[in-house]
Amino acid sequence: MEDVLDVYQRPEDPQRPLVCMDETSKQQVKEVREILPLQPGEVARQDYEYERNGVSALFLMLAPLQGWRHVEVRNQRRRLEWAQCLKDLADVHFPEAEKIVLVMDHLNTHGPASFYEAFDPEEARRLTHRFEFHYTPKHGSWLNMAEIELSVLQRQCLNRRMAEQAMLIRETTAWEAQRNQEATTVDWRFTTANARIKLKRLYPAFKN
């Protein structure tokens, strides 16, 4: 926990940008009956029945100090998809960075081994050296600032039915563009000193 909190206290460094990453999924559903449109004095009415139309994986990357975020929509959440998202993060979004400081949950797909499964050894080693990995502790995913942004994405974009993946991509792309235009940052105030006071019960107790 303190490792992640210490990372958040570092001053902004364009050569070592801080990026937080989190994942979620979205089920696509089709309407089985036509939605009744808005009428004066009435809301639109939607039947409770629906038809399942697959599930998409969403990878969200957030640079909280720069007010930048990006959402990748994929078919699955395997090592291959994670590795490709990070390759794009390094080579497309932050190509000039010396090293990307990456904060994420400690899943078995989140690590250099995924690079070696997705790419040839030379490329995997190159990508491994582009990142500085930091992991949130077990039951501590709330320390990942990308989780805050995922909550915003859910409220503003994903809290409705979407029939197909193409629609999901269009909507998340539009949401991303608006948020980036506003350059919305995260004002993180919880520090290591706060943790040692408020979460004292989580620290080991030593007897004299």
Image (tube, grey):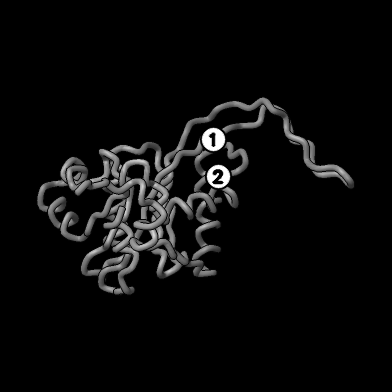
| View extreme (front): residue | 208
What residue appears at the point 53 percent right and 30 percent down from the top-left corner? 53
Give left or right: position of 206 versus 194.
left
**Nearest the eye: 31 or 15:** 15
User: CB under 8 Å between callouts 1 and 2?
Assistant: yes
Q: Residue 41: image x %, image y %?
A: 89, 46
Give left or right: position of 137 versus 35.
left
Report crowding for label 1: few under 14, some 14 to 19, many 20 or more residues within 10 A (C-alpha): many
- Looking at the picture, does residue 99 appear above or below residue 31? below
- Looking at the picture, does residue 169 appear above or below residue 188? above
Question: Disc 1 or disc 2, which is closer to the eye?
Answer: 1
Q: How many numbered tags mark residues here?
A: 2
Q: Amino acid at mark 2?
A: Met
| Residue at the disc numbered 1 | 28
What residue appears at the point 67 percent right and 25 percent down from the top-left corner? 49
What residue appears at the point 33 percent right and 73 percent down from the top-left corner? 12
| View extreme (right): residue | 40
Quadrant location of residue 190? bottom left
What residue appears at the point 31 percent right and 46 percent down from the top-left corner? 137
Q: Residue 91: image x %, image y %?
A: 27, 61
Give left or right: position of 117 versus 147.
left
Q: CA distance from mark 1 to mark 2?
A: 9 Å
| Label 1 element class | strand
- Among numbered discs 1 and 2, the one appearing first in the sequence: 1
Q: Amino acid at mark 1?
A: Gln
Query: Which of the labelled discs sits on residue 53, or is there none?
Result: none
Quadrant location of residue 126? bottom left
**Nearest the eye: 153 or 186:** 186
| Residue at the disc numbered 2 | 167
Q: Residue 188: image x %, image y %?
A: 44, 64
| Label 2 element class | helix
